[in-house]
Image: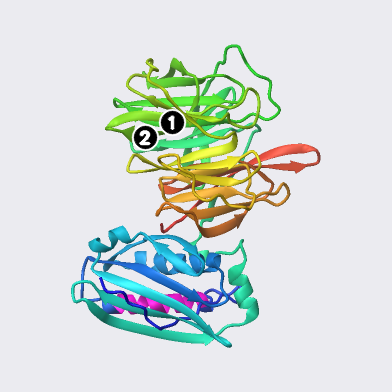
Amino acid sequence: MKKVIPHLLILFLYPCFIFPQSSAESLVQEAADTVQVFFKDKTAVRVAVVQFENYSELTDLAMQKIYQLLAARLENNQGIQASDLLLNFVNGRGEFNLSKVNELDYLIYLKLIQNKSKTGLGMAIFSRWQDKLVSIKYTEKNISQSEMELLNVNNFAFSEMGFSKLADFESKNNLLDVQSVCGPDGITRYFFYYPDEIIIYLARGDRLEKQSSFILTWTRPFYPVLHFQGKLLLFTFNQELVMTVGGNFSPYAQVLIFRDNQWLPTAKIGFIPFKQLMFNQNLYLVGAIYDEGKNYFKDKIFFMPFTDPAVHSGIVEKKIFPAYDMDFSIQDGQLQGIHVIDRNYFYHLLTADFSEETPEQVQKGASLSASNGQWLAVSDYSRQTDQIFFYDIKAGGQRPAYTGRVAGEIEFISAGIWQKINGFWVCSRLTQDGYGRSIVQFWGKRHD
């Protein structure tokens, strides 16, 4: 592959939240339209951005947002197969997974430059098979300092990339987790996990209708807690539906199997499963355990082969640090990464081999969740007006996608599905007149 450094530009700006389409969005669309026109007579063309250089006042964070907006437009183009190879932006340059270049037909090169009051981005399309540049696009416009500042702020992302609140319910207190499963009848059921009860709902339009419930029984030791916390996991094993439930009030998690139209306790596990994953074509449960009665996890992660609901042998332990929350991103059944919020509220990303990426120096909230190796949601470091931050993790990194405001203080975030849309359940607590209310919302992308 020849090294190509195009000297071209396209401006991105976002002057205001209230207009239906910003200048940045319209110019990104112009760039995407150029790609679409070029490939209009071709089918199943494999294309990706492989170089993006920044010579403007925009920060690396702003460049990630701009790239994400363009990538989203390209992924919506039905005539091409656009790949997202960006790993990170560092010191004005995008870092890409170039090991995938040989699988592509065309490569896109971008460069953003600022010249006095004008800023622009150039785009060049390079054909691997013809070994030459086949298309060039250049656009530039004026950009104000305030617009630059808006792009550079941490809590800003393009609304088109974003998640939106698709459902909103009020719940009784001490809701610990929400999960859903589609049964053999094609109906999705929503499981709300409380310390002593599981309530199962069906969706009726934009509301939930209770279908059934059953009581959870915990034996001693039972730890007194200030705030209940726990995890629920649902999965299919040997064509049977299996549930695991655990919390900070018990040293073990329960395993239940759905048989003869009832949930039957079958075993206990000495840690709380978060996810199921595959190693050497075998099913494993991976999870952690709370410190007794506390709101944080101990310094170990557990991997347990799951060959039989009643057999719990061969557990492997991995050392980690105590954490307020953690989750495991899984792609194609394989472990992709481990996301952790430590007890100082700092976020850490560990790879599948437990090597740590460079930790962030900005404090996060105490809740996070990963969805299918695609998206990560993290709460804000705030107790007043909370926020939820969404990140794209498809390439293994952590790139900002969108930020949403949430009333009250977020108690937990859980990846899930609402009416066939992937996203996140967010439970927050509101305090009014000395009484607490729990609000459950579902945030998702309608056109992901």
| Residue located 24% across and 61% down the image | 103
Q: Where, by quadrant of the figure, is residue 257 drawn?
A: top left
Residue 140, horizontal then vertical, whole percent: 48, 86
Q: Where, by quadrant of the figure, is residue 329 drawn?
A: top left
Q: Is residue 17 visible?
A: no
* Number of disc labels: 2
Residue 401, horizontal then vertical, whole percent: 51, 59
Q: Which mark is residue 277?
A: 2
The amino acid sitting under disc 2 is Leu
Q: Are marks 1 and 2 in contact (CB under 8 Å)?
A: yes
Is 116 displayed left or right of 242 in the figure?
A: right
Residue 396, horizontal then vertical, whole percent: 42, 51
In this figure, which residue is indicated by the disc labeled 1? 286
State yes or no: residue 375 in magenta.
no
Please, what secondary structure does the residue beneath circle 2 have? strand
- In the image, residue 219 sits, relative to residue 437, either above or below, namely above
In the displayed orientation, state which residue is furthest to the top: 220
Q: Which residues are magenta?
A: 24-37
| Residue located 64% across and 80% down the image | 145
Tell me if mark 1 has few (under 14), some (14-19) or many (20+) residues whose alpha carbon lies within 10 angstroms of its own: many
Q: CA distance from mark 1 to mark 2?
A: 7 Å
In the displayed orientation, state which residue is furthest to the right: 433
State yes or no: residue 26 in magenta.
yes
Quarter of the C terminus within the rendering? bottom left
Is 124 displayed left or right of 402 in the figure?
A: left
| Residue located 38% across and 15% down the image | 310
